[in-house]
Image (spheres, rainbow, N blue to C red):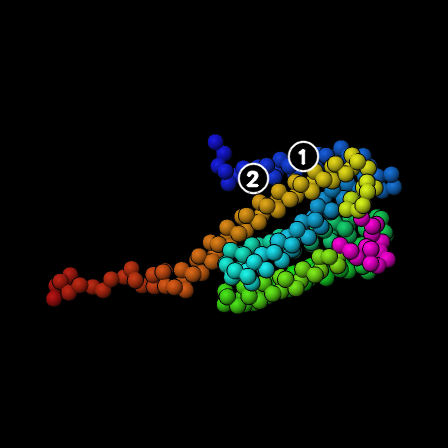
Amino acid sequence: MMPRSARLPVVAGVAVAAGLAGAMLAPPDRLQGELVRLMYVHVPAAWLAFLSFGVTFVASVAWLWRRRPGADRIAAASAEIGVFFTGLAIALGSIWGKPTWGVWWTWDPRLVTTALMFFVYLGYLALRRATVDPLSRARRSAVFGVVAFVQVPIVHLSVLWWRTLHQPPTVLQPGDPTIDHSMLAALLGNLAAFTLVFAVLLRERIRLAADEDAADAAQHTGDRGLAGDAVAAPRMEDSGV
């Protein structure tokens, strides 16, 4: 029987495979043709970036309220995942933008604010690396994680606040989504699959962080034996004296 801890990765893997299959079976776009299939990974990657930084925000607030180490681990783990998927969304957007806009990069408000969010959370991770004391690291990171979250609504609303090459929202809008329903079904399937991937990555990263914290605590409290403790002094009777 499959261990319970292995079920979620298997379910996530099956969901991703089904989602990608649905993306390949969805109809091509009237204008972009087959190029639109990048949407089925680009949009979920952006969604996971928002979700990850949202979890970091909530966990940071929880740490400032309760000061529990588990909240700090969740915040840090989720921020790492968010940085990865933000980078993936930017990379896929550049690949998509080259044949669509004719350039790999343009100073579009959505692109600029997304890149800024990417570097802000890289700064969050750098702050954690640079702070040795666990309590100071958790406190500074929690404050940073709360303040940095302002980037998420700015990125999301940038297509409404400024003139941008990106189209306005087609799914999260009042009324019926303006995307073809078969394409919407494939997109929602991939969003659900990538969310399961997020849950798997977050769980495993938290476990790793807990093991790292336990090892650091053992090292600093002297639970580990000192070098040379296993070497015993020679006994006088063994030397024949």
Q: Residues within 10 Å of mark 1 (few under 14, many from 20)?
A: some
Amino acid carrying mark 1 in the image: Ala
Instruction: Answer with mark 1 or mark 2, whichever residue precedes in sequence.
Output: 2
* Residue 174 makes an appearance in the image: yes
Q: Residue 65 is drawn in which quadrant?
A: bottom right
Instruction: Give the magenta-colored segment's residue range.
Output: 156-169
Q: Position of residue 231 (x, y in %)?
A: 27, 61
Q: Position of residue 1 (x, y in %)?
A: 48, 31
160 in the magenta segment: yes
Q: Residue 40 is drawn in which quadrant?
A: top right
Q: Position of residue 76 (x, y in %)?
A: 57, 57
Q: Residue 10 versus residue 70: which sits nearer the camera? A: 70
Amino acid carrying mark 2 in the image: Leu
Question: Among all residues in the image, which is located at the extreme left?
Answer: 241
Q: Image point 62% across, 47% down: which residue?
A: 198
Mark 2 = which residue?
8
* Residue 103 makes an appearance in the image: no
Q: Position of residue 109 (x, y in %)?
A: 80, 59
Q: Secondary structure at mark 2?
A: helix
| Position of the C terminus by quadrant | bottom left
Q: Residues within 10 Å of mark 2 (few under 14, many from 20)?
A: some
Q: Image point 61% across, 56% down: which residue?
A: 58
Mark 1 = which residue?
18
Depth-wise, is mark 1 or mark 2 nearer the camera? 2
Q: Image point 56% across, 63% down: which residue?
A: 64
71 in the magenta segment: no
